[in-house]
Image: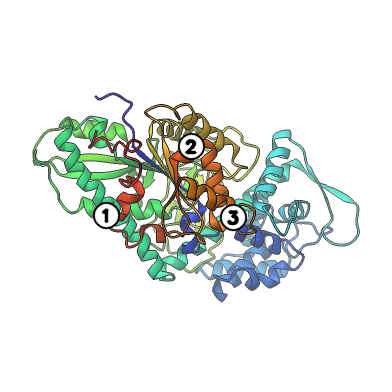
Amino acid sequence: MSQPSTWSETLVFIGAGASALLGMPQTSEQTKFFRELSKFGGRKSLANFTNDFAQNDLNRLEDFLILLGDDKTDEDCWLEITNGELAAARRAYGSAGVTPPDEILKKRILELRHSYDWLALKQIISICPCDEGNDNLIRDVYTLLDKKMNAKQGIKVRAAIGDKDEIVIDYSRLKGAYACVICFTVILFAKSWKNLAEGEKAEMFSSYKKFAETFARLMQKESFAFAEKYPDLTSREFYQFSTSFVSFNFETVFMWLLFNANREVNHFDKYLKTAQKVEQWLDFGFQTKSRKISSKPEDRKSEKFSYSYDEVVAFRQNECKASGSPVGRIGKFFFAHGSSNWRECPACGRMMYYLGDEWGYGSKHLNPPLPVPLFENDNFNRTENEKRWRNESLQSDALECVSCGAKTFASNSPMIMQTMIKGTPTSFLEEVQREVRVGLEKCRHVVLLGYSLPVDDVVWIQTFTEAIRCRINSEEKAYCSVVVGYKGEKRWMYGEELKCYADAHRYEKEADAYGAKAIESVISIFGAENVRAYCGGIPQVWGDATENELKEILYPQSWNADMWKGTRLEK
């Protein structure tokens, strides 16, 4: 094999701003949702702060909140189930065609309240800082919960109703409160994706699809050029994409678009001079399994699953020299904070990922099922066990672990949330983050696509600083393209102009909309001469997503020629 120092020349970091115009909820929108919903009677005004929810979806969400005990006061026992709550449960599960007896409904309601402690979360939110000008409730509530859970302490709050003494939410309830924040966050993302799948923002979504399709074709062209220069197809110089992606988002928009775009080019039947077909895949940074993407019932048998593609697979596959045999290339796509499409089995500890039942950019089943069927898409292709769990126990979110067959639930999604207290991540997330750190140390060009490198993200600021500053004065120094903000110039800015632009907007109320804070953070790490920025919005930055427009973002030839030495093809 080649030297292991061959890594992707360009590393793209995807943040929340990259999918904002697709309707994916930003931190500010999530903050507003939780802040308003946690108020007394907040459920009654759902329509005022959930603009993208249809009325039927709002009704189901309201029923879910009733099941979680939203109507209860501090004196009410959460174990007590009222007739109104039973009626809400019948509506919630009846919409999916399930009509169980009251005993099963009551058992499921108590399961939900134990897993997702909405009553505790509402009271915890009330003691979090509230600054209307700079409210970051999501960060504050996760930080508070992490702090108290690590210390095995409860949280002191004041009763939600009336002038009552302080009460303590016991430590044993904090895990349920934590899971509840995650659950509602996942619901918001799932709803936004459902809107896209049903055709909302179709023109905007089309621009993102063009980006993925052009990138896939660009990587396919790269395959043939690399094969000419690096005839050893088992070398990293050949099979490693020149661009890798790191997503800090929990949703799978970019990954799913690239997944489908790669699948399309794999069907083009392009062959090298060795008469071997070229295929390209995504590598998630660790070996895992997934359910087969299929709507056929026979594909939900226990032996029907897919392994993820990685360097080991590419190396072994490319060892075969027979005519017609496939040749694999891989593009790294890391979920540095985890994903809502992941499930960590509580029994065996293995991880699986879920990508739905159907191929296509607008898959309605891309997101895993929810604890209650909130949307009109509960006809998932389930295994026989999953059908039984859903019909007999109302566990609509239960998915069978592809490794050991145990139940996994929505609350088993391993994700690193917005918290100032960073613990040790689960083993596969740790492996992903190690891969990202090495990739950052080896890349020549960093693209921040909707990721602003915020000052409270101390772990990644330290990671960037160590990886970039140690080589800032060497021939191998890295440089950065900042694509953050939407109110700024719709062109690339460099050098003194860029510094003046950031200085002019740094103290404005909408400094983030101009990308000023992100530019300052990046300049402090990379150096002003090594930074350029486009602050006119995403997807505007790639225009019509032509090959040349993507090359200008990923492999800019217009920059200082001494800095950009090209991909391994030009070296």
Rendered image: mark on residue 212: none
Residue at 78%, 41% in the rendered image: 154
* Residue contact at pointers 2 and 1, CB within 8 angstroms: no
Viewer-nearest residue: 313 or 439: 439
* Spot occupied by residue 8 in the image (x, y as percentages of width and height): 33, 37
Viewer-nearest residue: 121 or 534: 534
Name the image colouring. Answer: rainbow
What is the secondary structure assignment of the residue under circle 3? helix
Is 138 displayed left or right of 377 in the figure?
right
Residue at 72%, 43% in the rendered image: 144
Is residue 89 something one can see in this rendering? no
What is the secondary structure assignment of the residue under circle 1? helix
Provide the residue designation for mark 2. 526
Above or below, 245 relative to 508: above
* Spot occupied by residue 219 in the image (x, y as percentages of width and height): 25, 46
Looking at the picture, which amino acid does disc 2 mark?
A: Phe
Point out the tag, 1 or 3, that comes first from the N-terminus. Answer: 3
Looking at the picture, which amino acid does disc 1 mark?
A: Glu
Provide the residue designation for mark 3. 505
Q: Nearer the viewer, mark 3 or mark 2?
A: 3
* Spot occupied by residue 445 in the image (x, y as percentages of width and height): 39, 39
Cα–Cα span, label 2 and label 1: 27 Å
Point out the tag, 3 or 2, that comes first from the N-terminus. Answer: 3
Provide the residue designation for mark 1. 547
Cα–Cα span, label 3 and label 2: 20 Å
